[in-house]
Amino acid sequence: MKEKVRLEGIQKKYISKKGETLALKEINLSVKENEFICIVGPSGCGKTTLLSIISGLIPPDIGKVYINDQEVTQIYPRVGYMLQEDYLFEWRTVYENVRLGLEIKGMLNGETRDKIMMLLENYGLADFTNHYPRELSGGMRQRVALARTLATDPEILLLDEPFSSLDYQTKLTLEEEMHNILKRQQKTVIQVTHDIAEAISMADRIIVLSKRPAVIKSTFDIDFQEDITPLQKRNIKKFQVYFNDIWKELDIHV
Ligand SMILES: Nc1ncnc2c1ncn2[C@@H]1O[C@H](COP(=O)(O)OP(=O)(O)O)[C@@H](O)[C@H]1O
Ligand SMILES: [Mg+2]
C-alpha cells in the first residue's frame, strides 16, 4: 500500500516566559493510504502538537513532514483537521458552520449543499440545521465539528479526541458510524485519543507515546477479522488482551 504520510525526526520545543518545554523529542512514523492510526499517550505528552505539525499549522523545529511524498511547508489543503476544542462559530447556524470549509474553497453548489444535508442527517442533526451552537449539547457540537471536517472530502483526517465530550452511548454510536463512513470512503486517518478501548475498536495500528518529551514508545498492530464493527470488537476476547498490553505501556500512574 502507498505511503501517505511520513514523519522524519520531528522535534518541537515551546518557548515562553516560564521557560522551555520540549514537547516532541524525535518522532518517526510512516502512515499508509487508507490506514487508520490511533495515537495514545499521557495527558500533556505532545499529541495535539504532533497533529498540528502534520497539518502544517505549526512547523517542527527539526525534522520533516511529507504527505504524498511532498514536504509539508504550509497548511496542506487535502487535510481535514478537527481540533480538540470544537471551535464552532457561535454566530453561525449548524448548517452555516458545516458549510464553512466548502465556502472558503468556493465549492458551494447544489451538489455540495445536498452533501451537507446528508451529513447532517447521518449525524442526527437534521432537525437542528438552523439552530445556533449555544442551543446544542456537547455531543451535538462535536458532531457538527465532525460533519464540518468531512464536508470538504479530505484525503487525510486528523482527529484530536473527536469523541471526548460525548456520553458513552453516543460515543459508541458515533464510533460505529465513523468506522462505516471512513471504510466506505477510503480515508487515511490519524486520530488522537486518551481512550484505549476507542483506539482498539477503531484503529489498524496504535502508536503509544511516552510521557513528555514524546517519543514513540511502542506500536501495536490491531488485527481483527475483516468486516467486524467497532462494537463487535469490544466483545471479542482478543480485545481485552490488547487492552491489557497497551495499558501497561502507558505511563499513567494513579
Ligand atoms: N502554545 C504553547 N506554548 C507553550 N507550551 C505549550 C503550547 N502548546 C502546548 N504546550 C505544552 O506542550 C506540551 C504538550 O502539549 P500538547 O501537545 O497539547 O499535549 P497533549 O495533546 O498530549 O495533551 C504540554 O506540556 C503543554 O503545556
Ligand atoms: Mg491534546
Image (cartoon, rainbow, N blue to C red):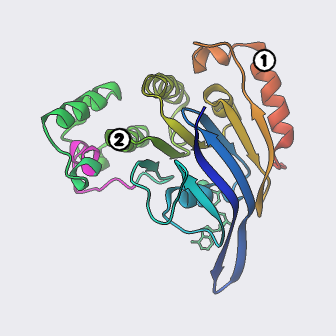
- Left or right: 238 in relation to 133: right
Q: Is residue 90 above or below residue 224?
A: below
**Mark 1 residue type:** Lys
Return the x and y of residue 32 as percentages of the image width and height.
61, 37
Residue under the point 34% across and 53% down:
88
Residue type highlighted by circle 2? Val
- Rendered location of residue 187, percent (x, y): 48, 34
> Earlier along the polypeptide chain: callout 2 or callout 1?
2
Kindly identify which numbered label has been placed on residue 238: 1
Left or right: residue 106 compared with residue 55: left
Q: Residue at x 68, y 29 (%)?
A: 200
The quarter of the displayed image where residue 11 is located: bottom right
Q: Where residue 207 appears, x then y in whole percent?
A: 72, 42
Name the disc covering residue 253, or none: none
Q: Residues within 10 Å of mark 2 (few under 14, many from 20)?
A: many
Q: Which mark is residue 144?
A: 2
Q: Answer few, some or many: residues within 10 Å of disc 1's Cα (few below 14, many 20 plus, some between 14 and 19).
A: few
Q: State the separation of the CA atoms marked 2 and 1.
A: 33 Å
Residue located farthest toward the left when viewing the structure as drawn: 110
* Residue 93 among magenta residues: yes
- Label 1: state its secondary structure: helix
Outermost residue toward the bottom in this view = 17
> Which of 13/92 is in front?
13
- Answer with the quadrant where ligand 1 appears in the image: bottom right
- Frontmost of labels 2 and 1 is 1
Q: Which residues are magenta?
A: 87-100
Left/right placement of residue 142 relative to residue 92 reads right
42, 112: nearer the viewer: 112
